């Protein structure tokens, strides 16, 4: 069957952001939009000799438009010369599971169809990202090449074939392409069994340990049910909202204190389980809450780094750790005590890939509820819960006790992120431009709000593995005492602009450690507003989301 060559014209704006291309569903459904982007991906990554025997992995988070997009992607992959394709049953693969499948099957790469924590449904968002043969998100040079290819298109290639039955496991053919519908959980579950002591975790649940896992009607439902309830014997009902729905039940599949409020309230209540956890649309984030004790993602990364050796996969210790720049410095203190390197990267998992591939780091994370290790090349929500469970099983204590003992040993980085969503994009850009100019006038030693400035800049990163440089990664103001304010514009939104303000300060004083985080950071919040002029420019007095 020969490919059909469909004439098309470039569509502007196909520039992948922090994590793939995210647009409104309506945009993706516009004539040729999806096809153009997929062709741009194939053009950008095609080796000079063609795709040859290459395998492409395809799966998504089950959101609205997932199935149609997968049918289109399969036809176009076949027409573009892929020899094999693996696709998750019902079109499902969580982001970390897609990474695991790519690695387990030696695939050329994969297409992950997701807009992660963005809302779904006909009026919601859709997204696509390409991951390479290491299982990780395409680095900037590839996403730049995809954008360039999207601007040079005059046709795309497809086939005239009936839809593949995504509900039936097993082989299928599409032109010359040999495809297979695979169980989306199997490879991932096998990997988790190799990393963790499932017998010990079974004993934990058999002893009455209670977990509440909120899958938010997103992709982790089948994974969490298979692992926590079926493999580890946690009672039915441990996994809530476990059925993936195209519109996530009308909610944002974002495991934060606003959208996972029911879980938070339960964990703060009188009959709270031992551990509360939630994941996002595509299963790569994790929210961790102990009984009466919210663990910030930055602290979770630090606590896991300090305790990871208690799980079999990490018993030999960590080669190094990394965190994104806006993530708090809590993990840096653990790394210093362990005598291992700690890298600071720009926001987005693609910047961890080289460090993981080179064996320089074992564990890494972001303040946005992302934690992961070298087992895949994505952040991994269910894995993070398994690691927490392993630590709790080995130390036989509560989340609160782990947090308290950690802060007593290392001090505490009080940390919060204030998101200002749906700002006018021009207003947000002007704010950042003027703020950058204001920060550029500051010199080390200048005093602001009672603190001495150590540095202020626009964060740039030099990748120590391949020497590539990334600039414009966030404005930061760092004080002599380690306190920081960071400002960034989100690269995952689809309408207007979201300004993220990250605030942090370190303390080793026991009375200060026990303080409420928002109170502990109130002076920095006020200073941040004064410097950026946010309230005056936008009329907003409160953030839309506080984490
Ligand atoms: C956000 C987070 C970032 C994360 C990214 C993708 O990006 O801040 O840490 O890597 O989402 O996560 P931004 O540019 O909006 O700040 V996910 O779970 O949405 O794929
Ligand atoms: Co996600």
Image (tube, rainbow, N blue to C red):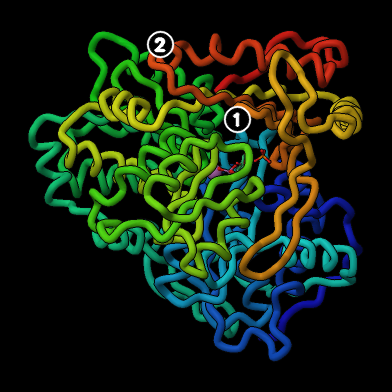
Q: Nearer the viewer, residue 400 or 238?
A: 400
Between the residue at mark 2 and the residue at mark 1, the CA separation in whole angstroms equals: 19 Å
Looking at the figure, which quarter contains the C terminus? top right
Tell me if I can see residue 286 in this picture.
yes
Q: Which residue is mark 2?
A: 511
The N terminus, quarter of image: bottom right
- From where the camera sits, is residue 240 visible? no
Q: Nearer the viewer, residue 353 or 108?
A: 353
Mark 1 residue crowding within 10 angstroms, few (<14) / some (14–19) / many (20+): some
Q: Given the current orientation, which residue lies at the most extreme front position? A: 445
Name the residue at 69% across, 78% down. Answer: 80
Quadrant containing ligand 1: top right
At a point 31% along the width and 10% down the height, the residue shown is 269
| Residue 477 placement: quadrant | top right
Q: Give residue 5's position: percent from left, percent from top.
A: 81, 77
Q: Secondary structure at mark 2?
A: helix
What residue is at 42 percent from the left and 27 percent from the top? 411
How many numbered discs?
2
Residue farthest to the bottom? 49
Label 1 sits on residue: 482
Q: Is mark 1 within 8 Å of ligand 1?
A: no
Q: Secondary structure beneath disc 1?
A: loop
The location of residue 151, given as percent across then percent down, is: 89, 63
In this picture, is 276 found above or below 111? Answer: above
Q: Up-down: is 351 above or below 172?
A: above
Residue 485 spot, x, y in % from top left: 68, 27
Q: Classify 390 as above or below 58.
A: above
Disc on the earlier residue, 2 or 1: 1
Residue positioned 61% across, 57% down in the render: 350
Nearest the camera: 461 or 163? 461
Residue 287, by quadrant, is top left
């Amino acid at each position: 069957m020969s490919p059909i060559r469909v004439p098309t014209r470039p569509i502007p704006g196909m520039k992948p952001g922090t994590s793939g291309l995210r647009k409104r569903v309506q945009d993706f459904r516009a004539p040729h939009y999806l096809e153009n982007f997929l062709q741009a991906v194939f053009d950008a990554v095609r080796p000079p000799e063609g795709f040859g025997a290459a395998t492409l992995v395809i799966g998504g988070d089950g959101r609205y438009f997932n199935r149609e997009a997968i049918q289109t992607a399969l036809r176009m992959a076949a027409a573009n010369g892929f020899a094999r394709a693996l696709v998750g049953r019902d079109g499902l693969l969580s982001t970390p599971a897609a990474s695991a499948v790519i690695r387990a099957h030696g695939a050329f790469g994969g297409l992950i169809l997701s807009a992660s924590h963005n809302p779904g449904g006909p009026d919601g968002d859709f997204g696509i990202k390409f991951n390479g043969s290491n299982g990780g998100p395409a680095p900037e040079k590839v996403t730049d090449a995809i954008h360039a290819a999207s601007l040079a298109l005059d046709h795309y290639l497809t086939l005239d074939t009936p839809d593949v039955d995504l509900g039936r496991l097993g082989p299928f053919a599409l032109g010359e392409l040999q495809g297979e519908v695979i169980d989306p959980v199997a490879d991932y579950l096998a990997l988790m069994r190799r990393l963790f002591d499932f017998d010990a975790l079974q004993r934990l649940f058999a002893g009455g340990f209670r977990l509440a896992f909120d899958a938010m009607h997103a992709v982790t439902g089948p994974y969490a049910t298979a692992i926590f309830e079926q493999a580890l014997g946690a009672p039915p009902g441990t996994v809530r909202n476990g059925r993936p729905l195209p519109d996530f039940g009308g909610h944002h599949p974002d495991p934060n204190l606003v959208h996972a409020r029911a879980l938070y309230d339960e964990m703060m209540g009188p009959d709270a389980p031992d551990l509360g956890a939630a994941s996002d649309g595509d299963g790569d984030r994790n929210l961790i809450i102990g009984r009466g004790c919210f663990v910030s993602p930055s602290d979770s990364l630090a606590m896991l780094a300090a305790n990871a050796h208690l799980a079999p996969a990490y018993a030999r210790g960590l080669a190094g750790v990394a965190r994104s720049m806006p993530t708090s410095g809590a993990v840096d203190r653990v790394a210093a005590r362990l005598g291992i390197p700690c890298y600071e990267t720009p926001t987005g998992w693609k910047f961890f890939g080289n460090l993981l591939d080179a064996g320089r780091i074992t564990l890494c994370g972001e303040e946005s509820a992302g934690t992961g290790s070298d087992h895949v090349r994505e952040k991994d929500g269910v894995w993070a819960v398994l690691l927490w469970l392993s630590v709790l099983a080995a130390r036989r204590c509560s989340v609160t006790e782990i947090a308290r003992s950690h802060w007593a040993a290392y001090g505490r980085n009080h940390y919060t992120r204030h998101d200002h969503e749906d700002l006018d994009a021009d207003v947000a850009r002007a704010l950042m431009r003027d703020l950058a100019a204001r920060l550029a006038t500051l010199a080390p030693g200048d005093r602001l709000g009672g603190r001495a400035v150590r540095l202020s800049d626009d964060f740039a990163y030099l990748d120590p593995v391949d020497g590539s440089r990334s600039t414009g990664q966030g404005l930061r103001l760092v004080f002599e005492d380690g306190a920081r304010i960071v400002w960034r514009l989100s690269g995952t939104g689809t309408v207007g602009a979201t300004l993220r303000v990250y605030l942090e300060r370190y303390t080793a004083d026991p009375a200060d450690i026990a303080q409420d985080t928002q109170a502990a950071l109130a002076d920095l919040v006020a200073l941040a507003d004064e410097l950026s002029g946010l309230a005056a420019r936008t009329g907003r007095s409160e953030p839309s989301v506080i984490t």
